[in-house]
Amino acid sequence: MSPTQLLDLSADTPARLTLLWRIDADHVLSIGSDSHTNDGRIRYAYQLSRKGCAIFEGRDFCSGGNATPTVEALAHAARCLLGFLTLRPGDVEEDYFAEYTPQQLSWRDAFAEELSIYAQDRCCGYCGADHDSPTRLHC
């Protein structure tokens, strides 16, 4: 774990973790295991906010089959989810954005391209170096 990351786990860690990823100075992605699907995948609850205002939130993002809720799985899920949330016109068919709110469309147009780089492994939203942005894990 790099010096910019902080791991906060109690001695009696429950199976349910939430990752708060401070992507950059304005954006935070919260993601945690919420439940399991009938086929054994982890269903995640998430919220992406900018300056404390929720842009995206839901429970419609799931892991692959037979996943285990670990810190590493949450970090991977957070990067994958950010990849979906930062899709732009040209990345997918236009109807992908049909249910976006005006606020989400405005956010996409202003910030998605810039934030999409942080969906890649080991890219810091503060300094651009080859390490994850500072994170805090909570039980």
Image (cartoon, helix red, strand yellow):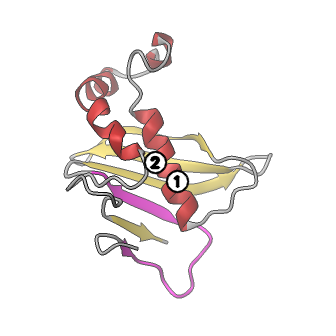
- Residue 58 in percent (x, y) is at 50, 40
Q: Is residue 45 left or right of residue 112?
A: right
Quadrant position of residue 109: top left
Amino acid type for the residue under numbered disc 1: His
- Residue that appears at 41% across and 77% down: 8
Front position in the image: 110 or 52? 110
Count up the numbered dots. 2
Q: Are marks 2 and 1 in contact (CB under 8 Å)?
A: yes
- State the mark number for residue 94: none
Quadrant position of residue 67: bottom right
Amino acid type for the residue under numbered disc 2: Arg
Identify the magenta region.
Answer: 6-23
Q: Is residue 21 magenta?
A: yes
What secondary structure do most residues of the magenta stretch adopt? loop
Mark 1 element type: helix
- Residue that appears at 30% across and 30% down: 113
**Residue 65 versus residue 9 in the image, above or below:** above
Question: Where does label 2 land, which residue?
Answer: 79
**Residue 123 versus residue 16 in the image, above or below:** above
- Residue that appears at 57% across and 50% down: 44
Q: Residue furthest right?
A: 39
